[in-house]
Amino acid sequence: MTRMRGPKVHSPGDRKTLWRTTLETGSRAFQDTAPLADFDIYVVGFHCARHAPHMHMEAHHYCRQVNSEVLHCVIFDGNTRDANLIGIEYIISGALFDGLPEAEKAYWHPHNYEVLSGQLSAPGLPESAEHALVALLVNSYGKTWHTWHTGRADGHGRPGDPLPYGDAQLMWSFNRDGEVDPRLKEEVNTSMGIDEMGKRARRRDLARDARPQRGVDALKSAFPEADGRPDGVRDADEEP
């Protein structure tokens, strides 16, 4: 059973009104929410801001597989009914990434470390099903924008904003051991019962299919103390 994580902030305003309750009843009876129906792939990971790399957030992704090479994801700060919508992510295969215009590639972060380190998990799935799911993400890339910084449940980092403030932030992946704030990782993993190191060990077989990726070293200078990475994680521009 998936353990629940609530939102980090609550928007100001009155609680749900009678009008809203009536509207929802009518919506369920007469309106079609088909575009949302297939957002049924749930994975949890961590993001940092590309241009403010010490802003770390947990990210609960609900994704729809468009085809074998594309996923669309909506991102929340928790997995409860009142979780806040904080961003979006588009995920594409390595083959599609290779065909992007050169300038566009700078917006897309690599996924191999997230998969092979065990930091990306699919709560509630049996281990065999989770393994098959993350295997599909080997060599993939994500383009992620967070529109709302809602803060962290562990109480560290910049406090959350009560509403979406300012510009959307381009987010990035972590690509070395020790980059993500260990306090945040420990709080999320403990509360959700995630065995990161066990997942890491069970995913070693996926390294054989992993290719060097662009962007692995993009934030290396921001985390000078971080070191170590699983087999299969290497920057495309790194010397062999």
Image: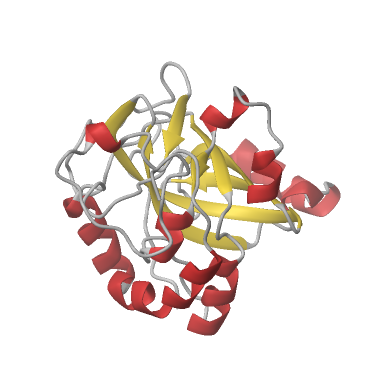
Residue 135's image quarter? bottom right
Q: Is residue 130 left or right of residue 215?
A: right
Q: Is residue 44 left or right of residue 51?
A: right
In the rendered image, residue 29, in percent from the top left (x then y), is placed at 81, 53
Residue 133's image quarter? bottom right
Give the residue at x 44% y 34%: 171
Residue projecting furthest to the top: 166
Q: Is residue 92 left or right of residue 221?
A: right
In the rendered image, residue 107, in percent from the top left (x then y), is placed at 53, 30
Q: Nearer the viewer, residue 76 or 12?
A: 76
In the rendered image, residue 9, in percent from the top left (x then y), is placed at 33, 39
- For the rendered model, the colour scheme is secondary structure
- Residue 14 seen in the current view: no
Q: Is residue 23 above or below residue 169?
A: below
Residue projecting furthest to the left: 225
Q: Nearer the viewer, residue 130 or 158?
A: 130
Residue 57's image quarter? top left
Q: Nearer the viewer, residue 22 or 61?
A: 61
Q: Is residue 32 above or below residue 4?
A: above
Give the residue at x 54% y 83%: 128
Q: Is residue 7 above or below residue 191?
A: above
Give the residue at x 42% y 16%: 166
In the rendered image, residue 51, in percent from the top left (x then y), is placed at 36, 24
Q: Is residue 33 above or below residue 102?
A: below
Q: Nearer the viewer, residue 7 or 72?
A: 72
Q: Is residue 173 left or right of residue 182?
A: right
Q: Which quarter of the image is occupied by the N terminus?
A: bottom left
- Residue 18 seen in the current view: yes
